[in-house]
Image (spheres, grey):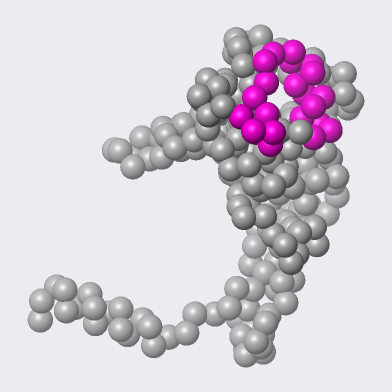
Amino acid sequence: MSEREKILGRIREALKVKAPRPGSHGDPLVQAAAEPPVSHARDWLPSVGASVEEQFAMFARNAADLKAEFQLFAGRDELRAALVSLCAAEKWRRIASHGGELTDFACQAIGLPVTLTDRGYDVQAMEKCDAGITECDALIAQTGGVVVNSRGAGGRALSVLPPHHVVIARREQLVADLPAAFARLQSKYAPDFPSMISFITGPSRTGDIERILVLGAHGPKKLTILCL
């Protein structure tokens, strides 16, 4: 028997065994149900703290592990100072953003030329932007990730093309885990979901070449999350 035949044989055998539905591990009653409840997923997902403080602490730890920077502010004056400091430290000359309460505030605070992706824009000007500033749908304590979409975060390119992605979030956008994030998206957008929903976990990275981690390979090299 050739190696090819052996591999195909193993695949055929594996296909005979049904995979458990998400959230139904170890529960035969749930496995038999047509649609297992989302709450069962929490039985095998990493636990999160019960209080908001514990969840913010977990988000900060997970974001740091992902090579993302996270800052939590008491008010808009602190947020403004952080944006001005970030702009000066990285010598930004132009930024990209979209219309929104928090993004408008951020662009005003920075005071640089802005390419707005939700009002028609020049692609070449977009490529010259040093940072893309967006709002988001949620921060996930369980993963340290950020949820954005093509409708509420300035389109598809804004969180991908500029070398530095800056997310401006509100405290109430923190959710404990992935089931809570999906529930929030369902509540906000169903049945007319955006064409793109992205769960961003840190800056773009790859380890394909000699297992060396390289940031910014297929998207932003830096991710900064500023929460008000």
Q: Is residue 113 magenta?
A: yes
Q: Is residue 39 left or right of residue 150?
A: right
> On the image, which quarter does residue 8 sit in?
bottom left
Q: Nearer the viewer, residue 77 or 50?
A: 77
Quarter in which the N terminus is drawn: bottom left
Count of numbered circles on the image? 0
Residue occupying the far left of the picture? 1
> On the image, which quarter does residue 100 sit in?
top right
In the rendered image, residue 197, in percent from the top left (x then y), is placed at 63, 52
Q: Which residues are magenta?
A: 100-121
Q: Residue at x 30, y 38 (%)?
A: 209
Residue 74 in view (yes/no):
yes
Q: Residue at x 76, y 53 (%)?
A: 176
In the rendered image, residue 159, in percent from the top left (x then y), is placed at 60, 37
**Depicted 197 relative to depicted 123: above or below:** below
In the rendered image, residue 103, in percent from the top left (x then y), is placed at 77, 30
**Depicted 25 relative to depicted 139: above or below:** below
Q: Nearer the viewer, residue 53 or 121?
A: 121
Q: Nearer the viewer, residue 91 or 227?
A: 91
Quarter in which the C terminus is drawn: top right
Q: Residue at x 62, y 16 (%)?
A: 94
> On the image, which quarter does residue 45 sit in?
bottom right
Q: Is residue 181 magenta?
A: no
Q: Is residue 135 left or right of residue 74?
A: left
Residue 163 in view (yes/no):
no
Q: Nearer the viewer, residue 137 or 202?
A: 137
**Depicted 60 relative to depicted 4: above or below:** above
Q: Residue at x 74, y 71 (%)?
A: 39
